[in-house]
Image (tube, rainbow, N blue to C red):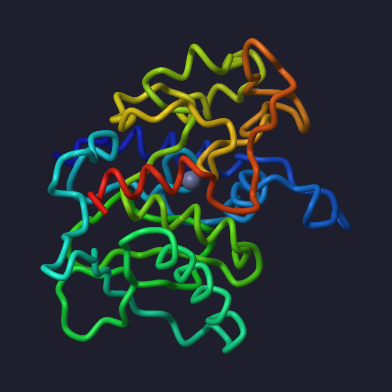
Amino acid sequence: MMTLSASLLLLLLLGLSQAHPLQEEGVEEDTVDITTRILTSNNATNEILLEGDLLAPRTRNAMMCWSQSCLWKKASNGYVMIPFTMSNEFTGWEKQKIDSAMRSFHSSTCIRFVPRQNEYDYISIENRGGCFSALGREGGRQVLSLNRQGCLYHGIIQHEINHALGFQHEQTRSDRDYYVKINWENIDPQMAYNFYRESTNNLNTPYDYSSIMHYGRTAFSIQYGMETITPIPDPNVQIGQRQGMSYWDIRRINTLYGC
Ligand SMILES: [Zn+2]
């Protein structure tokens, strides 16, 4: 089912090599939206990424990750136990940061991250060249990369974990055209695929501008600062927040996993 042709892969790589203008120096954390930070961190990565931070799947079409096969399994105790390992490249403080983000799932959902013993399926949290993750449970070891320089922020860690749970970007939802306008003319043509609509399972939840899975306004713009996503009808609605999971982000996890 892995059908990406070599030429498409090349195109993705070319696209990524010029993905995003570098962030200006000296910008405070608070002024940078989460997707700008993720995309900036991923600028130099060698991985093949979809939509900026999704690992191209080895075995299946990333866009159809809504069957049971790519969910993590629920144990008889009612919890969804997800084994993980953490690279020793992370310092104690960095590990704490990651731990704290994982604990935020424990306190609001039935997801439980547990240190891997000998389980076959698990998430390997590594310091690779960017912030990215596989979509859903891939089978076997799957990488969730949190680059030490650019990705160790609470909201970014939560965002990547949401991908690993099976969630896509909010603005690729099947019904997104009712809620946002994609400004194709402001998008680097090589990056246009990042904005393709997907046939998603929206779990009967409303389109959520405040989702941690929503891109910011200028993601993948052809020129720094140009708006690629505009909320409709009110263009002033905030998108691309990076503080933490929204009410609906949490509800969705609980719905998808039957918590
Ligand atoms: Zn993402």
Figure quadrant of residue 233: top right
Residue 4 % position (x, y): 26, 36
- Residue 165 is left or right of residue 37, and the answer is left
Q: Residue furthest right?
A: 26
Q: Nearer the viewer, residue 63 or 209?
A: 209
Residue 79 % position (x, y): 23, 66
Name the residue rendered at 35%, 48% in the picture: 253
Q: Nearer the viewer, residue 30 or 55?
A: 30
Figure quadrant of residue 8: top left
Q: How many marks?
A: 0
Q: Quadrant of the C terminus?
A: bottom left
Q: Quadrant of the N terminus?
A: top left
Q: Nearer the viewer, residue 224 or 209?
A: 209
Q: Nearer the viewer, residue 196 or 82?
A: 82
Residue 227 % position (x, y): 71, 23
Name the residue rendered at 62%, 56% in the picture: 41
Name the residue rendered at 16%, 83% in the picture: 118
Q: Looking at the image, is 170 positioned above or below residue 17?
A: above
Name the residue rendered at 23%, 35% in the picture: 64
Residue 70 % position (x, y): 19, 49
Q: Looking at the image, is 211 positioned above or below residue 34?
A: above
- Residue 93 is left or right of residue 25, and the answer is left
Figure quadrant of residue 44: bottom right
